[in-house]
Image (cartoon, rainbow, N blue to C red):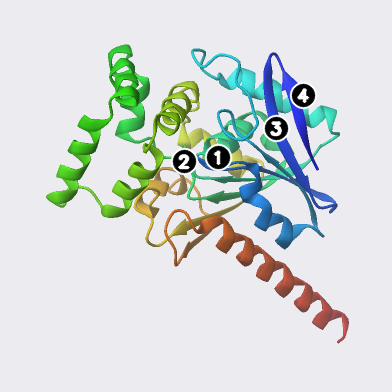
């Protein structure tokens, strides 16, 4: 199933799979849409009802004014209304890459209702220099807006950095893909600027996780040069109880592998329970 949820002029498109008693809210990465989480449906459909959202500027969701940033207060109102309308009291969340920001924003508001977080190479824990430059101050926003229309200087800079081994080839390919045409560059610019208020204090986030006994699972790619274990320490250094797995993939292959991991975990759990019941 799929449909829309509207709040104060914004339209959030959702996809829903499964009929399990547990609820999982899923937030995809940049350049994707909600259906990228369909591997989770195959892995968890019998235990979970999965709601996966198209984020604004992606899929069918609509943000009414690209000049207006998405405030945390508005996101809290929107998600609160969505949960109330769908009679969701307790839930789990997963966020991949950019989707990590929306997991953390929802966590700030509803930590007492959350049982589990599945973070997959999440953005929002470490803010990059380029993200900060693209959103603050106003002169830098104008600079990045100009790159949408005339990206050649950026391409030249990136290729020179790669030539002298100052930029990883994987990051260069990632940038090339997401900046390859005007439509993609505008999506980058709008996502950077509209989502700019979604910035978080990691000590506060850690306190919410600990104080509400939320199970945290984090999955990273061994060959991912964008979201690294070192960057995740901004959050993890404040926590003791969490699960961290580094999988043999880069940034883009993670959702499928994590879905497989979750399926194997579930199957192993059922096998253990059956073994105990047969003793």
SS label for mark 4: helix
- In the shown orientation, is residue 242 left or right of residue 7? left
Lower position in the chain sequence, tag 3 or tag 1? 3
Residue 36 percent across, percent down from the top left: 61, 49
Is the residue marked by circle 2 packed among few (<14), some (14-19), or many (20+) residues within 10 Å?
many
Q: Residue at x 38, y 52 (%)?
A: 228
Location of residue 172 in the rendering, given as x and y in whole percent from the top left corner: 29, 47
Q: CA distance from mark 2 to mark 3?
A: 21 Å
**Residue lying farthest to the left in this orientation:** 164
- In the image, which is nearer the foreground, mark 2 or mark 3? 3
Residue 214 x %, y %: 65, 47
Labels 1 & 2 near each other (Cβ < 8 A) = yes
Tell me: 146 left or right of 39. left
Lower sequence index among marks 1 and 4: 4
- Give the residue pinned by disc 3: 13
* Quadrant the C terminus occupies: bottom right
Foreground: 152 or 18? 152
Q: For the residues carrying marks 3 and 1, which lies nearer the camera in this image?
A: 3
Secondary element under disc 1, as helix, strand or loop, is helix
Q: Which residue is mark 1?
A: 99
Decide: marks 2, 4 in contact (CB < 8 A)? no
Q: With respect to residue 74, does 94 lie above or below?
A: below
Name the secondary structure under disc 2: loop
Residue 81 circle label: 4
Spot the residue most to the front.
181
Separation of residues labelled 1 and 4 (CA atoms)? 19 Å
Q: CA distance from mark 3 to mark 1?
A: 15 Å
Real-space Cα separation, disc 4 to disc 3, in angstroms: 14 Å
Could one spot residue 217 in this view of the protein?
A: yes
Q: Tell us which disc is closer to us: 4 or 3.
A: 3
Q: Which residue is mark 2?
A: 123
């Amino acid at each position: 199933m799929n449909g829309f949820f509207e709040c104060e002029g914004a339209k959030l498109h959702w996809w829903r799979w499964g009929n399990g008693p547990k609820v999982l809210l899923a937030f995809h990465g940049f350049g994707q849409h909600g259906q990228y989480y369909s591997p989770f449906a195959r892995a968890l459909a019998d235990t979970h009802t999965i709601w996966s959202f198209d984020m604004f500027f992606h899929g069918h969701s609509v943000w009414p004014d690209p000049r207006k940033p998405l405030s945390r207060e508005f996101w809290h109102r929107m998600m609160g209304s969505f949960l109330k309308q769908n009679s969701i009291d307790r839930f789990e969340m997963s966020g991949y890459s950019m989707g990590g920001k929306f997991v953390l924003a929802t966590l700030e508001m509803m930590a007492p209702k959350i049982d589990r977080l599945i973070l997959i190479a999440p953005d929002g824990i470490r803010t990059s220099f380029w993200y900060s430059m693209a959103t603050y101050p106003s002169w830098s926003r104008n600079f990045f807006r100009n790159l949408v229309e005339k990206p050649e200087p950026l391409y030249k800079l990136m290729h020179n950095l790669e030539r002298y081994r100052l930029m990883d080839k994987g990051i260069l390919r990632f940038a090339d893909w997401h900046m390859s045409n005007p439509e993609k560059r505008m999506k980058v610019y709008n996502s950077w600027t509209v989502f700019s208020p979604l910035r978080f204090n990691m000590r506060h986030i850690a306190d919410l996780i600990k104080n509400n006994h939320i199970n945290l699972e984090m999955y990273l790619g061994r060959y991912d040069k964008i979201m690294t274990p070192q960057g995740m320490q901004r959050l993890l250094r404040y926590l003791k109880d969490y699960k961290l797995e580094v999988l043999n993939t880069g940034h883009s292959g993670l959702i499928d592998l994590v879905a497989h991991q979750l399926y194997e975990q579930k199957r192993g759990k059922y096998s253990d329970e059956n073994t105990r019941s047969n003793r």
